[in-house]
């Protein structure tokens, strides 16, 4: 992708790196046992390129300039940088020019568009602008215009722009869809990591004021959608397949590095039939595994379900959930284990369990006195954590 000389500025971008360093390019994730890469999940959630799948030929296709600009506008709208994703607003703010979009866009032109976006974000105080940046970025085959030098150094430091390992940029090559996604995802993460507004747009049928919006954001932050895509519309009253339910839970458990619990979820998926609609019994068995893996306060709640045999494996799972303060079934204590569960019900139960998870707050020096060694060590820790999660998934 797009890489210049590695050089670190003290302190100013530490918060941004926390959101960026945990992700790798598409090719690095190709062998991981995940259903969707972060970039493709991102594309589907924001409605950029909805039909993309891992290994799809479309990923290596050239992207048109109009499609790239449209996707960029969507990203800037979703981060609160723009009030509209229209090309007119992109042009009015100096991000794109008035020329008619071409059938393709080169890597150089795409990169310069991203750099103009960075400069626009500086003006809007949406990204921290270092007081001084000495331009040191260089490529064997491309020397950017001097006006882009500070933004390019910033973008390289933040992990937003990279080139090849041979030091080449290949400026005249057509930008590919997967490269566009890589750029846009990192721009999105960078703005949010620096306090950008995060609008919830994962599902088009779940508005901002919906009762499930906050639980869904909580699940998103816990990793519930790392491994599966439930579609552009949630269709919350529709059923959820065993496979999707299992992948939601596996995504959360992978974040917690619970390989043993992931294996238990996989066994239930296999025995229940991955393509079948999930029943309340399947939900109870899987949710109990998550509850056992997740730190939470316990209650003395004891529930006797009239249609659940005492001492059965299902009864034990329901007892685990009761201690976590969760009641399933109906008010007359009928469990109805064979009934299909809706997506709202399943995600609501899972949210009840993960809502007590403490968000990770890395203790990182964020002042301008942080040294490059501090930042290098921080990035190393993030990458090490990412690699452990991948190993867990591969072992499971």
Image (spheres, rainbow, N blue to C red):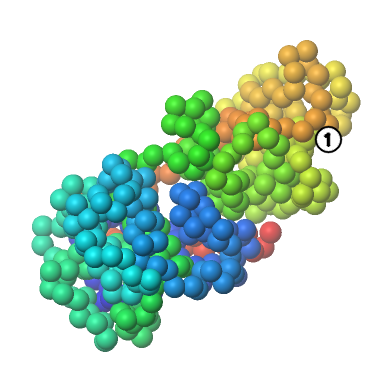
Dot 1 alpha-carbon crowd within 10 angstroms: few under 14, some 14 to 19, many 20 or more: few
From this viewpoint, which residue is outermost toward the front? Answer: 100
**Total numbered labels:** 1
Q: Along the line of sight, which residue is nearer the eye, 73 or 81?
A: 73
Q: Along the line of sight, which residue is nearer the eye, 88 or 109?
A: 88
Q: To which quarter of the image does residue 296 belong?
A: top right
Residue 353 drawn above or below residue 260: above
Residue 319 drawn above or below residue 12: above
Q: Along the line of sight, which residue is nearer the eye, 313 or 307?
A: 307
What residue is rendered at 66% in x and 25% in y?
A: 326
* Residue 370 percent location from the top left of the image: 21, 57
Q: Name the residue under label 1.
A: 313
What residue is rendered at 79% in x and 45% in y?
A: 276
> Does the rendering let one see residue 288?
no
Relative to 115, 38 lies left or right: right
Residue 21 drawn above or below residue 194: below
| Mark 1, secondary structure of its residue | helix
What residue is rendered at 37% in x and 56% in y?
A: 70
* Residue 367 percent location from the top left of the image: 20, 50
What residue is rendered at 81% in x and 19% in y?
A: 334
Relative to 86, 55 lies left or right: right
> Does the rendering let one see residue 259?
yes
- Report the quarter where the N terminus lies: bottom left
Q: To which quarter of the image does residue 30 belong?
A: bottom right
């Amino acid at each position: 992708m797009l890489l210049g000389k590695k050089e670190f500025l003290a302190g100013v971008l530490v918060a941004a790196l926390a959101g960026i360093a945990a992700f790798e390019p598409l090719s690095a994730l190709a062998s991981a046992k995940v259903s969707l890469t972060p970039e493709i999940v991102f594309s589907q959630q924001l409605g950029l390129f909805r039909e993309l799948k891992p290994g799809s030929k479309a990923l290596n296709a050239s992207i048109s300039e109009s499609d790239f600009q449209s996707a960029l506008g969507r990203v800037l709208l979703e981060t609160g940088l723009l009030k509209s994703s229209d090309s007119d607003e992109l042009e009015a703010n100096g991000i794109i020019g008035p020329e008619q979009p071409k059938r393709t866009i080169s890597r150089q032109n795409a990169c310069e568009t991203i750099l103009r976006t960075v400069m626009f974000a500086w003006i809007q105080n949406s990204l921290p602008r270092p007081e001084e940046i000495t331009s040191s970025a260089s490529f064997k085959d491309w020397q950017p215009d001097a006006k882009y030098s500070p933004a390019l150094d910033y973008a390289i430091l933040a992990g937003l722009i990279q080139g090849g390992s041979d030091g080449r940029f290949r400026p005249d090559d057509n930008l590919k869809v997967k490269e566009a996604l890589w750029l846009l995802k990192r721009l999105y993460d960078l703005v949010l990591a620096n306090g950008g507004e995060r609008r919830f747009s994962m599902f088009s049928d779940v508005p901002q004021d919906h009762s499930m919006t906050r639980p869904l954001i909580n699940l998103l932050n816990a990793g519930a959608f790392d491994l599966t895509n439930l579609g552009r519309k949630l269709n919350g009253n529709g059923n959820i397949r065993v496979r999707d339910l299992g992948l939601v839970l596996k995504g959360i458990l992978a974040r917690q590095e619970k390989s043993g619990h992931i294996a238990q979820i996989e066994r239930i998926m296999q025995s229940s039939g991955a393509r079948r609609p999930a029943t309340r019994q399947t939900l109870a068995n899987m949710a109990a595994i998550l509850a056992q893996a997740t730190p939470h306060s316990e209650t003395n709640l004891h529930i006797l379900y009239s249609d659940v045999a005492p001492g059965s494996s299902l009864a034990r799972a329901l007892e685990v959930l009761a201690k976590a303060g969760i009641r399933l079934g109906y008010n007359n204590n009928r469990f109805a284990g064979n009934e299909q569960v809706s997506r709202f019900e399943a995600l609501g139960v899972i949210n009840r369990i993960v809502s007590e998870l403490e968000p990770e707050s890395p203790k990182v020096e964020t002042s301008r006195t942080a040294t490059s060694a501090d930042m290098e060590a921080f990035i190393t820790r993030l990458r090490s954590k990412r690699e452990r999660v991948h190993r867990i998934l591969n072992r499971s």
